[in-house]
Image (cartoon, rainbow, N blue to C red):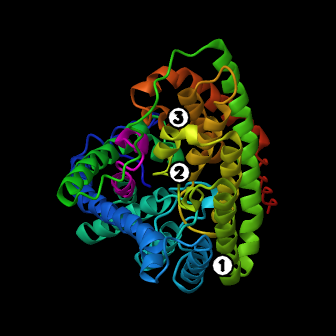
Amino acid sequence: MSPDPTQEPGTSPDPYALVRTRGYAGLLIMAAVLGVPISAGAYGFLALIDELQRWTYTDLPKALGFHGTPSWWPLPLLAAAGLAVGAAIRYLPGTGGHKPAEGLSTGGTAKPIELPGIFIAAVATLGLGAVLGPEGPLILLGSAVAVWAVGRLKPDMPEQGRSVVGAAGSFAAVSTLLGSPVTGGFLLMEVAGVGGPMLGVVLVPGLLAAGIGSLVFVGLDSWTGLGTYSLALPNLPAANAPTFGEFGWALLIGLAAAFVGAGLRRLALWLQPRVERRRLPATMAMGLAVGGLAITYAEGSGHSATEVLYSGQSAMDPLIVNSAAYSVGTLTLLCVCKGLAYCLSLSAFRGGPIFPAMFVGAAGGVALSHLPGLELTPAFAMGIGAMSVSMLKLPLTSVLLATLLLGTQGITVMPLVIVAVVVAYVAALRLSPVPARKAAPAPQ
């Protein structure tokens, strides 16, 4: 990039120079305009996933003459998911989206030719029962569509402007998915690693797109009656002020989550290259294994297999509302089966890693709340925050997920969540393998 002729020699570049240009105002307008169709498309995507889950697991068995859903039904469902995802990754351009075992990513923008493969892999993963969430595909699809649209509307836009618009597209796509545009904004900022003065430069167009996207989601809910598809827990038990004993539990929950998260990540990353060597049969095998875990939980607990299947986003509210119906043994079995199904899905399927981590942490917190000195709502919140940060390595987002989600109760338990998240974050980093350093090139 050529130096700025108006900048005096020896001075630092002005990080806010972009904001002062007329082009930045144009970026804001473009972010607002693109936020409408991208958020509407995201709403349609989530509605499709919700309908596909209901149709394949409940309506299809009835249409085939079964009285209810057979206990073995997850097996053919997950085998079909593995076949569709494996075929999309192997035969369509691209890799079907980001690899979730390697963490949530905003790096790189998909090419238009890769969008069908990303869409098919995501729909098959999310709609047929694999244990991943919609945030990963939505971030990638929103960014790709925004950059593609900008290329058509303004081909001469500089690369920095394209990056800002691409980020705004991602903001719009996940505008209400995490319960608040603010949570989605911090998620994308932490994932992208944007900091310093540039944080605000990129954040403002994204928040504008997310705010408009939230309005679109609310409007479409009012128009269609399908729902907002926003993470929400409206029926939480009241939480009392934190006690010293609960701060002790925060330390233990943080440490436990770090070890569980490290184990799941290591196993998923160990499985991933083995799946890639034989993509189609291995992905189907992983799908069958996920189905087997769901059946094991259903037969062993008497609860629905869907508590193990899918992302867990819509299952967290019923879990805490009906917590009295779950014994410690049932909750432990749920954590084991959901955790292993999550790990297998990370290694082979395409989706986001956030919601299953939250659900495993929530179930673990509910199980621990049976122990003395730990109330249900704080345990639930600490489990969500600690497990989220152990899998995502995003401490601020993890605190927000576990507190904003709880509404007014989240303010009460926030000190406990912060302690659990910090402990889990530091411990998870210590347990993570040190990245191999690249050798310096030999002198010529």
Where is 176 relative to 378, above or below?
below
Q: Classify residue 370 by image quadrant.
A: top right
Reading the image, the residue beneath label 1 is: 284
Residues in magenta, as a range: 166-185
Q: Quadrant of the N terminus?
A: bottom left
Q: Secondary structure at mark 3?
A: helix
Residue type highlighted by circle 1 = Met
In the picture provided, is 69 more to the left or to the right than 115? right
Given this view, does label 3 or label 2 mark the residue nearer the observer?
2
Where is residue 156 shown, x and y percent of the image?
29, 66
Q: Residues within 10 Å of mark 3 (few under 14, many from 20)?
A: some
Q: Amino acid at mark 2?
A: Phe
Is residue 177 inside the magenta stretch? yes
Q: Camera-side residue: 338 or 106?
A: 338
Between disc 2 and disc 1, whose residue precedes? 1
Residue 208 percent coordinates (x, y): 27, 45
Disc 1 is placed on an element classified as helix
| Mark 3, residue position | 396
Quadrant of the image occupied by residue 372: top right
Identify which amino acid the numbered label 3 is placed on. Answer: Leu
Q: Earlier in the sequence, mark 3 or mark 2?
A: 2
Tell me the SS state at disc 2. helix
